[in-house]
Image: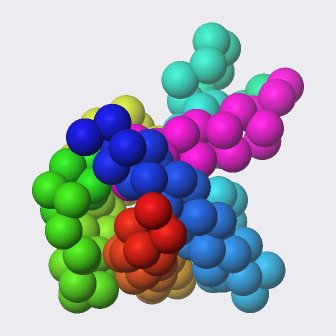
Amino acid sequence: MTRDLVRGAESGVLATAAMSAVMLAGDRAGLMSDQPPKRIVRALLPGHRHRPKRGERVLGALAHFGFGAAGGAAFALLCGGRRAPVTLGVTYGLAIWFVSYRGWVPKLGVLPPIPDDRPGRQAVMAAGHVVYGATLALAANGLRRET
């Protein structure tokens, strides 16, 4: 079980890297005004929740990869050591997006819920979570094959 959790966390880090590429592309295309992980960290750090804070970019990246690794470990538990269909990974990634951006992220006052958010950010974040889930399943299956 520990080996599955470690593989899942590793897969989650790889999936988060792929997702981050989608998010950065969306940002460069002008579809997002700011990266959500950085905004979440900004809201949680002491001081005014909407003003930039020192170190928020690095802390945002660390938090994003940590959350992705934890999501990967949870996915490994869900799969119970079996191969993960890519469709399950995509569904899992979209479920994370839905629960986060319809639940705790708006409750923190970081971003509005999905229906009230900018259409460009909605599209980028949905696509990013599809990429996260697909990459997570593929990476988990590839790491499982190696050992």
Return the x and y of residue 12 as percentages of the image width and height: 47, 57
Return the x and y of residue 90 as percentages of the image width and height: 29, 80
Magenta stretch, residue numbers: 54-73
Residue drawn at 69 percent across, 75 percent down:
21
Residue 22 in magenta stretch:
no
Residue drawn at 20 percent across, 49 percent down:
77
Residue drawn at 65 percent across, 58 percent down:
35
Viewer-closest of 44 and 112: 44
Q: Going by the picture, which residue comes out furthest to the front?
A: 147
Residue 103 visible? The answer is yes
Residue drawn at 42 percent across, 80 percent down:
138
Return the x and y of residue 80 as percentages of the image width and height: 15, 56
Q: Quadrant of the N terminus?
A: top left
Return the x and y of residue 24 as percentages of the image width and height: 72, 73
Judged by its main secondary structure, the magenta piece is helix
- Looking at the image, residue 82 lies above or below residue 135: above
Residue 129 visible? The answer is no
